[in-house]
Image (tube, rainbow, N blue to C red):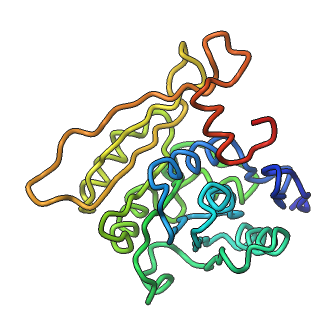
Amino acid sequence: MTPARLDVLTRGLRIWQRPDGHKAASDDVVLAGLAAREQPAARRCLDLGTGKATVAMLLGVALPEAVFIGVEAYPESFALALRNIAENRLEARLAVRQGDLRDPTVLAGEAPFDLITGAPPFMPVGSGPPPSDPQRAAGRFELRGGVEAYAATAVRHLAPGGRFVVLMDGAGGARAAAALGASGLVVRRQVDVRPRPDRAPTYQVLVAAHRAAGGANAPVRETLYMRDAVGDGWSPPFAALRARLDLPGA
């Protein structure tokens, strides 16, 4: 397994990650940015399948008064998360628990969370050849459950009035909506994230809340373009999202 290297995450944060492993990417930026926009007053945040703690660290920039807990099962990713917390001196605001998010004892005794985030793996085991790197395989294949497991965990720990923000691949919105509904949550917003106006969605982000008595209205549908029509620069909404996360070049 290749050793980790120290890379730039934001203008103020650095991240230890493996060059051949599961690296910080646009999905982390999209999830953190949209979650911060959705719940700007959140004070207690939970990141499921936190990996190296990328999303939690990005959210910490946008939500400077919040505290965070991450849950991660894969040992190497958990070790990198601890290293990143120490590197950026975030011990007072960010803690990571090692364990399977399906295990109810991992978060036993924790108070409810205002904001819960997650980017579950979306490929069932056997649906394709896994990456040779085990860390990348753990981030892509449902070795410990998919969005259904994330939704079941989120509903147990979401505060009244809280939001669960989940990122799926571009074709995963219907499955995620079904999983959220089955768990007792209702989708309030769905965002199709497209790289350019002429491209299919790369990601779908769903924002869910506890089901209100008497049902709920249809979710608000939204499209976020990462690049403008020309394709050479960030779109204004995505540039604003990046700026809120203090990303280089924002």
Q: Residue at x 37, y 69 (%)?
A: 158
In the rendering, at what x and y percent does residue 91 appear? Answer: 73, 79
Please report the residue visible at 79 percent of the width from the left and 51 percent of the height from the top: 9
Q: Is residue 174 above or below residue 214?
A: above
Picture residue at 86% right of the left edge, 62% below the top: 1
Locate residue 95 relative to residue 120 in the image: left or right.
Answer: right
Residue 116 % position (x, y): 46, 63
Residue appearing at x 59%, y 68% in the figure: 65
Q: Nearer the viewer, residue 12 or 15?
A: 12
Q: Is residue 229 left or right of residue 222?
A: right
Q: Position of residue 68 (x, y in %)?
A: 59, 71
Q: How many numbered callouts?
A: 0
* Snapshot quadrant of residue 182: bottom left
Position of the C terminus by quadrant: top right
Q: Where residue 215 sits in the image (x, y, percent)?
A: 12, 52
Q: Quadrant of residue 228?
A: top right
Along the horizontal axis of the image, is 78 left or right of 15? left
